[in-house]
Image: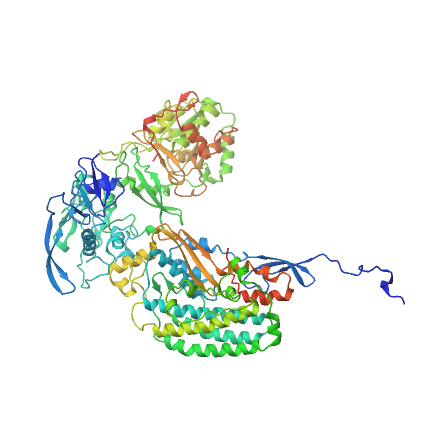
């Protein structure tokens, strides 16, 4: 592969690469504001300027400038190299690029940073970006000098509502236009633009329009400073108190990779941020998905209940024992859930098929919804494909309703509260459900056992493309909830069986490879296994 | 009437001759801080002594690895809490060595003057407390009166009497007060006068001298083998003072002597400390004479030094600098360093490892006391029980320093 040199280090590049992209791939970051790997390069922030040495024998590309000679106090004509934006320049074989090692580049970065802070308000103490702000990082890395201009800074609109989700602060904006480009290039809705020139520049929404749609949160995420903030996260938390885990969005079958930020002091989730994955979501997530972090707390089942009356888990399990006493295996229906991890579903399937020995396996989940051709999938369940690989013979929800109506099934063991259709007919059966969230199943269940949400235990989810992805544990279990696979083990014990799984690794051991479970193979396409 | 023992054979009246075990400490009034001695006594003679440190254990080094580099200062205050300023300066020098920065001259002189004041306070406390434990309460009050004068200056400078937390990476928390030189010039002769009075109360006292002379003696090579440094080593005649041998700050530019003893006994240690008080006075006088009245105290490296508050409140650049230093901590370059200074009790070493982040990766302390306490048993074995008190007192064990 062709290579060029950056500060003496050899950097390979592919045709079509820019200097900054090739360097970024090697882990060599050239400072930048406006460049984003997922967007076009306008080269307007000038932070990524580099010096490119002339080819041997060629004259350098220089500028005539006047420089102050501090000894004589006079300006002298000198020449300095013409610096080039690394986000726009394509490298050539053997090209020598200077970044940190060029005094001209160091000076340019310092001056660009100084200009960007010229009219910046003293907002760090009240700014949500504080702690993850590029202006802060680059001041310490590339400027390090105090303010020289003590005039009144230019004032611009603050707290402008761009739409139902985003608030804009013109004074903090560095005019990188990442938000403008994101809306035009990725969301395909060019609703943002900039007006005025120079230090009167500001970002505006098209007249008569609002910043709305399914991808508005991303404008905040691509903003390198605190100019765009989401109403959802605004003034909610200081980022240096948050911890983060690698999670997977549960909003739809796309399975976008996300960082789940939570505060360990309050055991509370605060936001999602997209986690770059070229194969799934690239750098983006949709608004609906970004807000699903709230499901870690909203609509939760936190205590066990018997007939809608709160009970301890022990009492609820005793009720399960008496409900299922003497019930023939054929009358028991097992309902897997496309909203739960492979491990949870495996445990319930193991209980139903192997321990109880019932052939009646169904699956449930949320009904389909909106879809687009960017990220949003019509299937609103995170693990539909996983459930279908685990139990290819599982019948859909409607078959369960019919079986209960026909009285062939009198007892139901269900995972999750969600149902894709009208579940009222299930009231004729005795339903035991292990659920993290309230839903049709928990409304009519005889016994409800609390399960942890995806945020409180490590779980594997298979997205629509068949990629296995693990969402890590962030929060401690809320209320009396336990991971569903553990609750299934408790139910198995209550029914007089001995579960074969005690720890998560026992289940994961079964899931790796195509282990045969009760005669049917766990279909795992070897090539699609991806656990980031 | 016949005597009772007429039928007994010789020796039968002897008391059982098994050695007696005695626990001294960990909360004995003469056990400075908390240290325990398990003594095996034969009568009043110490046959064997087992000195156990570790009763004061705060996990000091681990605590230092939780916060930022600057947040270690309050912890080092609590090492040798009789002379916290010396620890502050020692730690600041270690981090500065790792960062490769030097503080301005004015700050170096200031650090020296404050450090020597702390040394005077340290020695006064040690000698005064030792005399008190031998029953001489008046000299103790005399020495503490002199220490109060030192502490008044330190309080004026730092706002705190004991735990100043006054050191900073790249400088000090505040510049010297306008009155600092005047306060020192006025207090030093007064302090020396009070010390001399206290001295006369003791050094003409036959009982006091008898309790000290030839008690707890150790030879120079033995002390070196135990890793002793500081006044306890110099009392044996070894003239090893880090300020002379490996000068830091401006110690190579000032005139002072290193008092040494001859026999390495308790009296020598007592006298070496009194001698060092006089030398500290000389150093302070030279330092304040040469310290500029104006000019920067902190270096101008924005990576480690906080900006002025007035700037923080009005300019974004200073706000960012403040934010970075407070919330993330000064980023100390990755690497390791061992830096050592002459503290009140001897070599105070800091071995620091940085992974380049704002939090120390490892803070390892080499406290002078730890090695000295390791030699206590050697000093007192074979001596009388009562000799423990002056011997142990003259070693100036500080619990906070021995936290291991």
- Residue occupying the point 18% across, 58% down: A155
Colouring method of the image = rainbow
- Residue B255 placement (x, y as % from top left): 40, 72
Q: Is residue A46 left or right of residue B32?
A: left
Please tell me which residue lies in front, A94 or A350.
A94
Task: Name above or below for residue A74 compared with residue A195.
Answer: below
Q: Which residue of the protein is positioned furthest toward the right in this rendering?
A: B1
Which quadrant holds residue A187? Answer: top left
* Number of marks drawn: 0
Q: Quadrant of the N terminus of chain B?
A: bottom right
Q: Is residue A164 visible?
A: no
Please tell me which residue lies in front, B243 or A192.
B243
Which quadrant holds residue A70? Answer: bottom left
Which quadrant holds residue A524? Answer: top left
- Residue occupying the point 39% across, 42% down: A474
Task: Name above or below for residue B260 compared with residue A216.
Answer: below
- Residue A228 placement (x, y as % from top left): 23, 49
Q: Is residue A49 left or right of residue A409?
A: left
- Residue B65 placement (x, y as % from top left): 42, 53
Please tell me which residue lies in front, B372 or A526.
B372
- Residue B299 placement (x, y as % from top left): 30, 63
Q: Is residue B193 visible?
A: yes
Q: Is residue A14 left or right of residue B372?
A: left
């Amino acid at each position: 592969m062709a290579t060029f040199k950056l500060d003496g280090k050899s950097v390979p590049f592919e045709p079509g690469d820019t200097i900054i992209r090739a360097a970024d791939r090697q882990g060599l970051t050239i400072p930048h504001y406006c460049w984003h790997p997922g967007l076009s390069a306008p080269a307007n922030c000038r932070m990524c300027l580099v010096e490119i040495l002339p080819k041997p024998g060629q004259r350098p590309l220089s500028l005539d400038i006047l420089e102050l000679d501090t000894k004589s106090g006079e300006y002298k004509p000198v020449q300095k190299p013409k610096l080039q934006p690394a986000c726009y320049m394509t490298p050539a074989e053997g090209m020598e690029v200077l970044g940190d090692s060029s005094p001209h580049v160091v000076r340019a970065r310092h001056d660009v940073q100084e200009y960007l802070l010229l009219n910046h308000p003293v907002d760090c103490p009240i700014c949500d970006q504080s702690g993850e702000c590029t202006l802060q990082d680059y001041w310490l890395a590339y400027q390090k000098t105090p303010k020289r201009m003590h005039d009144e800074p230019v004032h611009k609109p603050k707290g402008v509502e761009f739409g139902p989700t985003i608030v804009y602060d013109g004074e903090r904006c560095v005019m990188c236009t990442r938000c403008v480009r994101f809306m035009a290039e990725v969301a395909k809705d060019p609703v943002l633009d900039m007006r005025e020139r120079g230090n009167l520049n500001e970002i505006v929404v098209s007249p008569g329009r609002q910043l709305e749609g399914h991808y508005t949160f991303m404008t905040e995420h691509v903003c390198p400073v605190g100019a765009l903030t989401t109403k959802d996260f605004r003034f909610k938390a200081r980022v240096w108190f948050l911890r983060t885990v690698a999670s997977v969005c549960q909003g739809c079958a796309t399975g976008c990779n996300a960082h789940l930020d939570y505060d360990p002091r309050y055991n509370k989730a605060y936001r999602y941020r997209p986690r770059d994955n070229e194969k799934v979501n690239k750098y983006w997530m949709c608004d609906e998905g970004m807000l699903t972090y709230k499901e870690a707390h909203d609509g939760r089942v936190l205590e066990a209940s018997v007939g809608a009356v709160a009970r301890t888990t022990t009492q609820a399990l005793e009720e399960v024992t008496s409900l299922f006493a003497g019930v023939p295996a054929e009358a028991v229906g097992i309902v897997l859930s496309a909203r739960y991890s492979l491990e949870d579903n495996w445990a319930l399937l193991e209980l139903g098929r192997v321990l109880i020995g019932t052939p009646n396996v169904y699956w449930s989940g949320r009904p389909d919804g909106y879809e687009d051709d960017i990220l949003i999938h019509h299937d609103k369940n995170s693990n539909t494909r996983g459930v279908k690989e685990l139990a290819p013979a599982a019948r859909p929800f409607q078959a369960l309703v019919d079986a209960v109506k026909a009285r062939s099934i009198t007892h139901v063991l269900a995972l999750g509260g969600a149902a894709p259709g009208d579940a009222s007919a299930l009231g004729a059966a005795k339903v035991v459900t292990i659920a993290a969230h309230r839903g049709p199943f928990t409304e009519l269940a005889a016994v409800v056992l609390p399960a942890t949400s995806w945020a409180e235990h490590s779980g594997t989810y298979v997205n629509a493309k068949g990629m296995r992805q693990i969402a890590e544990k962030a929060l401690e279990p809320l209320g009396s909830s336990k991971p569903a696979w553990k609750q299934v083990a408790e139910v198995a014990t209550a029914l007089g069986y001995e579960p074969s799984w005690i720890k998560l690794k026992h289940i994961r051991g079964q899931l790796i490879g195509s282990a045969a479970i009760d005669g049917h193979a766990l279909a795992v396409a070897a090539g699609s296994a991806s656990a980031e | 009437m016949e005597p009772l023992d007429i039928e007994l054979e010789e020796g039968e009246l002897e008391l059982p001759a098994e050695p007696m075990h005695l626990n001294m400490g960990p909360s004995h009034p003469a056990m400075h801080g908390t240290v325990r001695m398990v003594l095996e006594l034969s009568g009043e003679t110490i046959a064997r002594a087992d000195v156990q440190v570790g009763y004061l254990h705060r996990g000091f080094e681990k605590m230092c690895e939780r916060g930022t580099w600057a947040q270690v200062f309050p912890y080092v205050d609590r090492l040798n809490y009789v002379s916290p300023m010396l620890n502050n300066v020692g730690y600041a020098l270690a981090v500065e060595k790792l960062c490769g920065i030097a503080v301005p001259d004015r700050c170096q002189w200031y650090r020296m003057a404050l450090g020597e004041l702390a040394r005077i306070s340290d020695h006064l406390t040690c000698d005064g407390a030792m005399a008190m434990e031998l029953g001489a309460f008046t000299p103790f009050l005399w020495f503490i009166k002199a220490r109060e004068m030192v502490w008044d200056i330190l309080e004026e400078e730092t706002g705190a009497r004991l735990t100043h937390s006054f050191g900073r990476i790249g400088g000090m928390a505040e510049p010297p007060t306008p009155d600092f030189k005047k306060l020192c010039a006025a207090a030093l002769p007064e302090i020396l006068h009070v010390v001399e009075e206290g001295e006369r109360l003791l050094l003409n006292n036959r009982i006091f001298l008898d309790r000290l002379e030839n008690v707890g003696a150790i030879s120079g090579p033995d002390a070196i083998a135990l890793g002793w440094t500081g006044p306890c080593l110099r009392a044996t005649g070894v003239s090893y003072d880090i300020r002379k041998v490996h000068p830091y700050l401006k110690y190579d530019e000032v005139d002072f002597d290193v008092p040494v003893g001859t026999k390495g006994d308790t009296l020598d240690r007592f006298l070496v400390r009194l001698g060092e008080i006089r030398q500290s006075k000389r150093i302070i006088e030279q330092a304040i004479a040469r310290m500029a009245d104006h000019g920067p105290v902190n270096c101008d490296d924005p990576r480690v030094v906080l900006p002025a508050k007035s700037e923080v409140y009005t300019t974004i650049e200073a706000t960012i600098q403040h934010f970075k230093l407070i919330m993330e901590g000064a980023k100390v370059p990755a690497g390791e360093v061992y830096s050592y200074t002459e503290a009140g009790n001897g070599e105070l070493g800091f071995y620091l490892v940085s992974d380049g982040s704002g939090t120390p990766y490892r803070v390892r302390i080499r406290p002078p006391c730890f090695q000295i306490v390791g030699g206590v048993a050697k000093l007192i074995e074979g001596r009388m029980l009562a000799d423990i008190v002056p011997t142990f007192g003259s070693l100036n064990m500080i619990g906070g320093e021995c936290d291991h």
